[in-house]
Image (tube, rainbow, N blue to C red):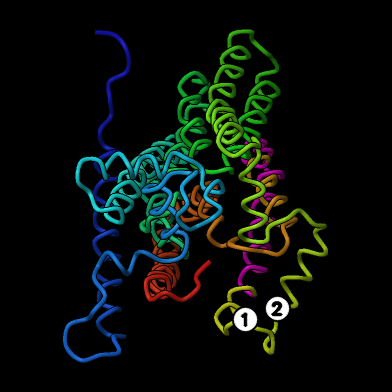
Amino acid sequence: MTGRRWDRRPWVQALILVAVTRTVTYAVAYAATLFFAATQGPNAEGFQAIWLRWDAQHFVIVAEHGWTGEAEPARPAAFFPLYPLSMRALMAIGFPPVLAGLAVSAIASVVACAFLIKLADEEIGEGAGRRAALYLLLFPTAVFLAAPYSEALFLAGAIPAFYFARRGEWLQAGPFAAVAMASRAAGGFLLFGLFFEFVRQGFRDRSWPSRRTRDAAVAIAVGLTPFILYCLYLWKARGTPLQFFIDQRDGWGRTFVGPVDSFLATWNTREGLTYPTNWIFAWRIEILAAFAGVMMSIWAIVKREWGYAAYMAIFMVALMTSTWYFSIPRMLLSFFPVMLVMAKATYGRPERHEMALLVLAPVATLGVIVFTRGAWFY
């Protein structure tokens, strides 16, 4: 018998961690609807309804009607295809739309956590992976891993892609990069990071073997394929291959501006304007999140982790040259190297690990309550 033996331990750990945190998340979310109910007696809002918030509504509509239907939202091209198509696959066998979205996110979370465990255990030490997965599942905006959003599916592609790339197994990295690319436009940042991971390995080894070069090129080409196919589909269906840019601009006001203009637009969202109080507070956190993202990019540069650095830095450039800072705390979920840094900082130091959990868990719980109650949460 040849080949590596399959190690099920990371998968069992990931399944247990996701199952426990997801059960608690669902319980907290529904308990919040009962505690904050405005009426007496049974709450009028069911379990599925509390998860149908913000972009989750858009994903459900796109899953039901596609990218050319007349149903709202009028800007469906902004939502890349893999997550709605995955929902539709479960809907075809009887899942209600919201439950389909929750199921896809749960399955994807297991995949993402399993590979994060493998990555951290191999690069930091035995046991570090479990901590890294916990930090991901208890991240302040981890509610978006549970909700019908595409974050979990994106990570289910991004983390394995980097895992295999860093091991030099580029051909295995390609399909996972394609999953990330088909899930979110941020897949383009992942491919950028994978290219620089290839460069890092070349300078580290002081060699550029033709086989690795070929395999890396194939992996990046495979990763880029869903983007090309989506553009061709939009070109045929909507008349322009970059319709997702247009829908982002017209639906959410996102355009490219200078970094100073973007910062000032975010900073100037003060009381007295038409924004609700929690939006104004959220925009202050956007600025802190942007600072954290920049610091993580700088850390990766200092450590000469060129793959991680390129991935996070280009991500931050895009976020900080938008009309204003928008959803940066949520986007930081995709910065999985943060979880590796935290796992390394707490490795062999249980008191640091406990302190991290004491900080993360309450904030993550707050996020679940805020989101499922329908208030704005990134």
The residue wearing badge 1 is: 275
Q: Residues within 10 Å of mark 1 (few under 14, many from 20)?
A: few
Residue 135, position in %: x, y? 43, 56
Instruction: Give the image location of residue 115, x and y in percent.
Output: 40, 37
Real-space CA distance between mark 1 and mark 2, rounded to the nearest whole angstrom: 8 Å
Quadrant in which the N terminus appears: top left
Instruction: Please provide percent x and percent y for residue 279.
Output: 58, 77
Query: The residue under label 2 is which amino acid type?
Result: Thr
**Residue 271, percent from left and from top:** 67, 87
State if disc 2 and disc 1 touch (CB < 8 Å). yes
Q: Nearer the viewer, mark 1 or mark 2?
A: 1
The local secondary structure at tag 1 comes to loop
Q: Residue 61 vs residue 24: left or right?
A: right
Task: Identify the residue shown where x is 50% and y is 24%.
Answer: 174
Tell me which numbered mark, 1 or 2, is placed earlier along the sequence. 2
Q: Amino acid at mark 1?
A: Tyr
Q: Residues within 10 Å of mark 2 (few under 14, many from 20)?
A: some
Q: Nearer the viewer, residue 181 or 170?
A: 181
Label 2 belongs to which residue? 269
Instruction: Please give left or right for residue 101 compared with residue 266 in the image.
Output: left
Rendered image quadrant of residue 349: bottom left
Q: How many marks?
A: 2
| Along the line of sight, the residue nearer the viewer: 89 or 360 | 89
Q: Give the magenta-colored segment's residue range.
A: 284-309
- Would you place residue 279 above or below residue 36 in this image? above
